Image: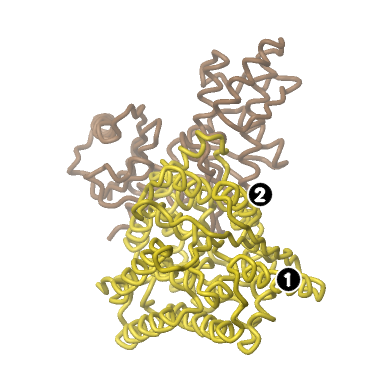
Amino acid sequence: MAGRLKATKKMKRIMRNYYMEAKYSKYLGKKVAWITSGGPVEPLIAMGVIPVYPENHGAMIGASKMGGRLSEYAEGLGYSQDVCSYVKDDITSSITKESPIKGGLPEPDMLICSNNICGTVLKWYEIQARKFNVPLFIYDTPFVHTEFTDEARDYVNEQTKEYIRFLEKTLGKKFNYKKMNLVGKRSLHAMKLWKEVLNTAAHKPSPMTAFDAFFHLALIVTLRGKKIVITYYQSLLKELQERNKQNIGAVDNEKYRLLWDNLPIWFRMRWLSEKFASHNAALVADTYTQAWCGVIDYIDENDFLGTMGEAYTRIHLNVGVDQMADTIKGFILQYDVDGLVMHSNRSCKPYSFGQYDIQNLIKEMDIPVLMIESDMTDDRKFAESQVEARIDAFMEVIKQKRKEKSEG
Amino acid sequence: MLTLGLDIGSLTAKGVLFDNGSIVEKHLIQVGYNSKNAADKLMEELLAKASVTSSDIKKVIATGYGRNSIDFADKSVSEIICHGKGIHFLLPDIRTIIDIGGQDSKVILLDEKGTVVNFVMNDKCAAGTGRFLDVMARAMETEIQHFGELSLKGKNPSKISSVCTVFAESEIISLVAKGENREDITSGIHLSIARRIVSMVKRVGLVTPVAMSGGVALNIGVIDALQKLLKTTVKTTPLAQYGGALGAALLAQEID
């Protein structure tokens, strides 16, 4: 057995220090901004603001199996069962201070919201802006149905300028373009490294699984633009390359390779990983963690501010299903997978809506597709024996297909 | 070689003994709350019925929701593969199988050789499952055995719009209050479940000929509604309820 990646320990330390710094920001004379997971964080880093991600916090709440309880509390306040569980977890935690982090998230001095991941974030951040009585900046990214137009480019670039003015006004100081230049380069460097990390999984056997990717993702989400992200991913990459050299697979005796679509089921990571491993199956890649390196080609490292608008607009969740299906087809070939596992996530509508269309669009790839109905953090939405029955049947179909192929 | 296939579902447990290319004996009991006890009882009664002892059985495969609780099974296999195998044995030309189980409904696509190439199962909701029919039959105070026949007598099927088992029950109460007749309401109930199943069939893509496996295949009303909506014949066999157990017994023949 390959065991845990050594980098895991280091990662935990970095994340702990990051949250400590954020918690004690006031004593350090620093400001805290809450920001959506797909939001443009680099200008914040350039201005020395500490970005805090309620969605990352939501993932931690989910992994700590607190999601169902926190969602239930929010439903008691009147939020619908159908509202995203990250939203409900955050709203509850900001009231009750229940959290895997002692005392919950540090309170924000400002809120940065981009709707490139969904429309729900707009209302979520408006609610929190009222609660904390802090300024809110919305970075509005038009949906890319088929192509990214010049008008769309002008529209988002204008908002980048507005964003800078917002930061200057809120922080009471001039924007640091020199630092921004450095942060932009580091951010792009980190994304490229993250892509390389994920690419190592194309090796057979794969040195990492999507479950590893879900964990190691935290840094590229929260701190991209900081040097520590680069050094961390460099060491992780080295460890994975070393595994590949020695043909050490993350899953013992890997026979089948799978692709995951949608956010993880945070509270069932271990169960799912063991369930698939018991079939000698490794989830070698996923569409979710790839989202943080999917737009590298649109960024000019010498003009980060001028190109980030397009990059942030073109992310996986802000494009039409045709393009999403093309991305998935690419991964199926790149990682040479035997099957696709789609998590139909009650919380994440933009990710789950269209999954059946995507299934139709990728029919030519001729791989079995499994649908798992659940939620990223709300454990009330997971039925173990039903999911188990589906996974077993799915794996048997894959095994049978492999057998047929080998028998010609 | 005498093999045993056990299908321990959420409502009923089925057992099939197989040898020399044909079914030796079959048996069915209600599960109750303990699937392990049900399997023991099923086994005992089946052996007595066939006048064989457990040592005569060479291999055992278990399937269904209780498959992992059967400690004397050599292997457990999911229902999808078992139903595919069982129905292919009984009706070799079938390409699409519809199985409405107690908790799960599934549509299974086979290739010409009877190999499962794709399948779809219902989402987490019980609306398109056998449980829906059970609840509705009770609401209509009809024995489940006569439920299908009753539906055939409906001339203007009532509109059941709720897809939720619980809400559909209250919808029926209000239809009764409005004075709609039993036959029409029952007919509407059967069309409602068939619509759920048809959307699953469309998801995998309909390939004819189609057959139904599982206990609900005995319900003539469901077959009729499915045929109307799919615009094709839906075949079945008197042994449909044993499709999964038979498939398991057949797969047990292949164990080395």
Residue A191 appears left or right of A349: left
Colour option used: by chain
Q: Dot 1 surroundings within 10 Å: few (below 14), some, or many (20 or more)?
A: many
- Which amino acid is tagged 2? Lys
- Residue A14 or residue B200, whichever sits in front: A14
Q: Residue furthest front?
A: A172
Give the SS element for disc 1: helix
Residue holding disc 1: A156
Residue B7 appears left or right of A325: left
Chain letter for the part of the structure drawn in yellow: A
- Which amino acid is tagged 1? Val
Identify the residue at image location x=53%, y=72%: A290
Q: Position of residue A260 (x, y in %)?
A: 49, 64
| Quadrant housing residue A392 | bottom left
Identify the residue at image location x=68%, y=66%: A319
- Residue A142 or residue B14, whichever sits in front: A142
| Quadrant housing residue A309 | bottom right
Residue A279 is labelled as: none
Q: Position of residue A69 (x, y in %)?
A: 41, 41
Residue holding disc 2: B202
Which tag is nearer the camera, tag 1 or tag 2? 1
